[in-house]
Amino acid sequence: MNIDTLGRRSRFKRTPSGKRLVITERDIDILRWLYRYRYLRAPQLILFLKPKSEKRFIERLGDLFHETGLIDRPKAQWQHFDARCTPMIYELTIKGLGFLESRNQLPQRATTLSRQKRAGRNVQFDHAMMIVDVLVDTELATIATPAQRFVCIDEILARATETTKAAPNPLSVPVTIQPNAAFPNIKSPWKTHIIPDALYGIEYFIEGEKRYRFWALECENTSPRKRRSVRKSSLLRKQAAYNALIKSGAFKKHWGIPNLKLHVCTRKDAVKIRRSFVKS
């Protein structure tokens, strides 16, 4: 067994002790939140589930990791791991996914990153955590605000066209960038596709009526602000593409939503959000 000099199990490797666990409703809630977001920091789970004892809750996460195989600690987080006090990041395992499916308890997804049985697109971990942190921050803010509700991607796609639902990537939407001053090398309309990092909305209950606002999220971790070529990714190109999409209104038919704004999260923004969770 991987035990340190203080008798603690390794944080880096699953080390079962033979302890028998009875899965509780709170445990199932943990699995459901992990499916909803794919990755969650321990402080984020605490904010969502509000346990009476945070210490006991953290211990329970450790037991679920070591003893059940229902949740995992993604190895990619170790590259930033420098102390035992660093909050752990968790994800659902294939076994955990099967557990929820067998009980018909899969929740709606907040992001298309969610764990799947089949191989999905390759996820860049740091970028994925930026997406998760922004969405979690947004959903927690709506939970704390009366007359607001977070609208997740699965709820949005439920209103989309059958063509969109059946597409390999329902978030991919065609757009045409017209010649403009930002890209003088574009001499004729340039057709491309936009694939937001996430799509979400907020429902507002105002004077007895429900109103909605929707955002396409772009997390900018490494892309430069501007490139000479429009064919290479840059923040300026994405902004031009979203401007064209919003102006055309094509998102209304593609995603079935009435409005759209662009939400750009920079690395500086992401650091600020992440620190707010760690301090919570």
Image: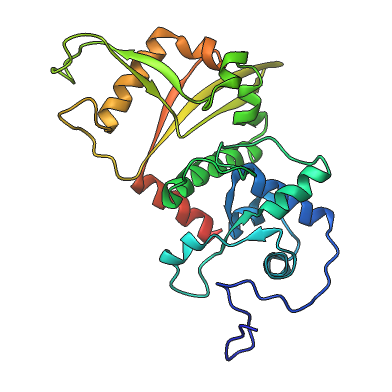
Q: Position of residue 44 (x, y in %)?
A: 60, 53
Q: Position of residue 58 (x, y in %)?
A: 67, 67
Is residue 78 shown above or below 27?
below
Residue at image x 59%, y 30%? 153
Rendered-image quadrant of the C terminus: bottom right
| Image position of 224 (left or right of 192) | left
How many tags in the picture? 0
Of residues 140 and 177, which is closer to you in this image? Answer: 177
Residue at image x 64%, y 36%? 109
Tell me, yes or no, if residue 256 can be seen here: no
| Image position of 138 (left or right of 272) | right
Q: Residue lying furthest front in this view?
A: 118
| Image position of 80 (left or right of 179) | right
Of residues 251 and 270, which is closer to you in this image? Answer: 251
Rendered-image quadrant of the N terminus: bottom right
Quadrant location of residue 113?
Answer: top right
Of residues 146 and 37, which is closer to you in this image? Answer: 37
Residue at image x 83%, y 53%? 25
Is residue 46 shown above or below 187?
below
Residue at image x 20%, y 8%? 188
Q: Position of residue 110 (x, y in %)?
A: 60, 37
Is residue 137 shown above or below 231?
below
The image's colour scheme reads: rainbow
Tell me, yes or no, if residue 248 can be seen here: yes
Q: Position of residue 265 (x, y in %)?
A: 39, 39
